[in-house]
Image: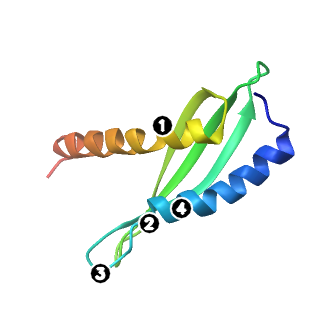
Amino acid sequence: MAYPRKVLYLAVFLGLTVLSGNLAYSQTPDQPKLTIGSISLGSTGDGSYNANVNLALQRTGNPQVSFNLSFQHVRTLDEVYAKLRPAVDHLADELKNAHDDFPH
């Protein structure tokens, strides 16, 4: 089902509040906090959307790091949310492996 743009933006705004609460881990001096900075949707013309999700990793005493994840041809925000956690887990694994590529 295709949603009107105003409904999608309202759903994104409301969804950010809920999802940010679900994804934001409580921050202590030693633990990072991952939050959603923004979600943008672009219509593909066939009733689907391309979604870009900007994530921010905040660490006490360290600079904030941002990541952008893209999901092609999604139909609902629920579909974006369902794909988000596995994508973040995959990104974390890739960052762990990429650590070895940095010069010491």
For marks 2 and 4, the one nearer the N-term is: 4
Furthest residue to the front?
A: 1
Residue 15 versus residue 53 in the image, above or below? below
Direction from residue 11 to residue 4 in the image, left or right: right
Label 3 or label 1, whichever lies nearer to me, is 1
Residue name at image x 79 percent, y 21 percent: 45
Give SS at disc 2. loop
The residue nearer to you, when weighing 81 against 50, is 81
Discs 3, 1 touching: Cβ within 8 Å: no
Label 1 or label 2, whichever lies nearer to me, is 1
Direction from residue 9 to residue 89 in the image, left or right: left
Residue position for label 1? 83
Direction from residue 2 to residue 103 in the image, left or right: left
Image location of residue 59, percent across then percent down: 36, 71
Residue position for label 2? 64
Residue name at image x 50 percent, y 54 percent: 55
Residue position for label 4? 20
For marks 1 and 2, the one nearer the N-term is: 2
Give SS at disc 4. helix
For marks 4 and 1, the one nearer the N-term is: 4
Label 2 or label 3, whichever lies nearer to me, is 3
Residue kind at label 3, given as amino acid type: Pro
Image location of residue 8, percent across then percent down: 77, 44
Q: Mark 1 and mark 2: span between their CA atoms?
A: 23 Å
